Amino acid sequence: MREAFDFLNGKVYYLATVENGHARVRPFGTVDYFEDKLYIQTGKAKDVYKQLTENPYAEVCAFDKGKWIRVSGKMIPDDRVIAKKHMLDKYPDLRDRYDENDTNTIVLYFENPKAYIYSFTEAPRELK
């Protein structure tokens, strides 16, 4: 997942979840690579977290320089302080709203993700 992180890092990507059988998509910007896993961050009070607790399968997508990435899989919440701190240290501007010791901050990682890079001129390439 390091290559997926490298593609997503510093970019806006879109996270798709499901709510009551309907797709929900929103822009995200937090992404981290920690303990060989691809992580995202949100707040437990947000609808996106509620959607992921009801149906933990999600997909992210981003586009850059004629290529795009799709990463899909089951999102696993990681409430450990060390994992949240790693994310927030990477995004210090979030510290006015989130803290690794609060009850709202949550990071989630993809368990056994499927990731592919696509382009208009090449066949899709699976990331291992």
Image (cartoon, rainbow, N blue to C red):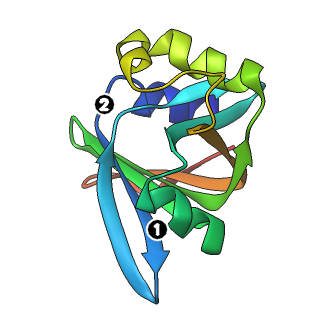
- Quarter location, residue 24: bottom left
Q: Amino acid at mark 1?
A: Thr
Asked whether residue 41 appears in the rendered view, the answer is yes
- Residue under label 2, please give it: 11
The answer to whether residue 6 is above or below residue 50 is above
Report x, y in % for residue 125: 52, 51
User: Which residue corresponds to the image point at 51% horizontal and 52% vertical from the top-left?
Assistant: 116
Residue nearest the viewer, comparing 29 with 126:
29
Left or right, 65 with reference to 126: left
Residue 55 visible in image: no
**Residue 48's disc number:** none
Left or right of 35 in this view: 30: left
Q: Nearer the viewer, mark 1 or mark 2?
A: 1
- Spot occupied by residue 101 in the image (x, y as percentages of width and height): 66, 22
Q: Examine the rendered structure and indicate whether residue 44 appears above or below residue 83.
A: below
Q: Residue at x 46, y 68 (%)?
A: 17
Residue located 21% across and 42% down the image: 66
The residue nearer to you, when weighing 86 against 103, is: 103
* Mark 1, other Cα within 10 Å: few <14 / some 14–19 / many ≥20: many
**Disc 2 marks which amino acid?**
Lys
Identify the secondary structure beneath mark 2: loop
Q: Residue at x 46, y 87 (%)?
A: 20
Q: Which mark is residue 17?
A: 1
Residue furthest toward the bottom?
Answer: 21
Alpha-carbon span between mark 1 and mark 2? 19 Å
Per the image, label 1 sits on a secondary structure element best described as strand
* Residue 12 position within the rendered picture, expressed as x and y whole percent measured from the top left: 28, 37
Would you say 119 lies left or right of 117 here? left
